Image (spheres, rainbow, N blue to C red):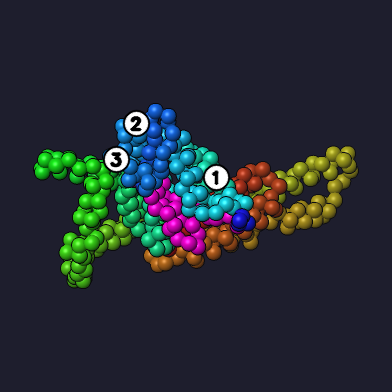
Amino acid sequence: MFSMMSNDIGIDLGTASILVYIKGKGVVLKEPSVVAIDRDTNKIMAIGEEARLMIGRTPGNIVAVRPLRQGVISDYTITEKMMKYFINKAVGKRTLRKPRISVCIPSGATEVEKKAVEDATYQAGAREVAIIEEPVAAAIGAGIDIGKACGNMIVDIGGGTADIAVISLGGPVVSTSIKIAGDDFDEALVRYMRKKHNLLIGERTAEEIKINIGAASRRPEVLTMEQTPDDEEHLWEILSSAMEEAAEKFVASREIEGEHLKHDLLGKLDYMTELVDFIEARSPQIISEYRTRLEEKVKELLNGTAVDEGRIASEVVIYADKICVDEETVRLRSHIENTKRELLSGESVGRKLDFIAQEMNREANTILSKSNDLELSDKAIALKTEIEKVREQIQNIE
């Protein structure tokens, strides 16, 4: 009987054991990651729990091997066959579509090691493969909301590696993987029993001792937690002097910065005043020079004929009105003086000065648009540049 639906499968590919989870069913398989092989024929005799039971009870030509060491693949071919066996055993019936599989790996795995796991999973019959770090999977399995903006420390002790990670906002912020874990505990138990009691035990017995005796979580007296209320007055005594000193230094640094800023702005405003003085002095000269050029041109064209002074005066008046910037310079001078007064007042003037700077920029633009004299245009451009510098500095004033 075929099933049209594919399964979503999660596999914890551990050094000591393999867990297979199927969406909607939970953990359906947990067996040791052990494979029994006939060394003479290189044939696989048993996989999983059946292979584990054969440890120490088989002829010399049949050996039990672990194709995973310290969380990574040590024998690719055997790992592929073992995964295929477990997937088929967990699914239980044939499907028309291959399953999607997520596989856990240690957080310290290299890209090459990740690729080996991914390839082995595809070869074992996966349609899609997702690689996930073990601490992240452990956090999700423990019911922790890893999407929150708070740190959760996860310590995942497996058979070959122990992974430690701080997880926040859906992923590990910092993580590490050490190659000291359950297998090392088993070896330590074997050495201890041999040295202390002159008793030789195997891996299976060491594993059982570790699980049944060495589990601190089963002994309430071993793990205790006591939360004491914070002494807020004591904490304030410790922190208050440091906070007050930091605040005083911050205010002092801001005052020093403000003084330097004020002197810089006053210097720029003085230079702007000099530019306005030049524009005011240059404007009458421009009119006089225009009248002279106009008279010379008219005399040249009339070739000795009498010049109508009234007509020339009328043209000069029209030209003077067109280029007149008296109103703009008066307002500019007023804005500059007003800015100086505000700076020297010592009050909060940031927004007010920003508005004044905008008005000054508008006046400078008008002067520049009316000018057809090179010298005056240069000064107007310099004036606009200084106003922009003043506006940038004003952004730092409160």
Element under label 2? loop
**Frontmost residue, 317 versus 158:** 158
Report the span colored magenta: 5-31
Q: Which residue is mark 3?
A: 57
Identify the disc placed on residue 61: 2
Where is residue 197 drawn, in percent x and y?
Answer: 10, 43
Residue 196 visible? The answer is yes
Question: Residue 50's x, y, as percent?
Answer: 37, 46
Disc nearer the start of the sequence (1/2): 2
Q: State which quadrant residue 298 falls in.
A: top right
Q: Position of residue 387 (x, y in %)?
A: 54, 53
Q: Main secondary structure of the magenta part?
A: strand
Kind of residue sitting beneath label 1: Gly
Between circles 3 and 1, the one closer to the viewer is 3
CA gap, disc 1 and disc 2:
30 Å
- Give neighbour class at mark 3: few <14, some 14-19, many 20+ (Cα, 10 Å): few
- Name the one closer to the observer, 257 or 59: 59
Residue closest to the eye, 227 or 130 = 130
| Quadrant the N terminus occupies | bottom right
Q: Which residue is mark 1?
A: 125
Whether residue 108 appears in this view of the structure is: no
Q: Which residue type does callout 3 highlight?
A: Arg
Residues at marks 3 and 1 touching, judged by CB atoms closer than 8 Å? no
Q: Nearer the viewer, mark 1 or mark 2?
A: 2
Looking at marks 3 and 1 on the same chain, the residue that comes earlier in the sequence is marked by 3
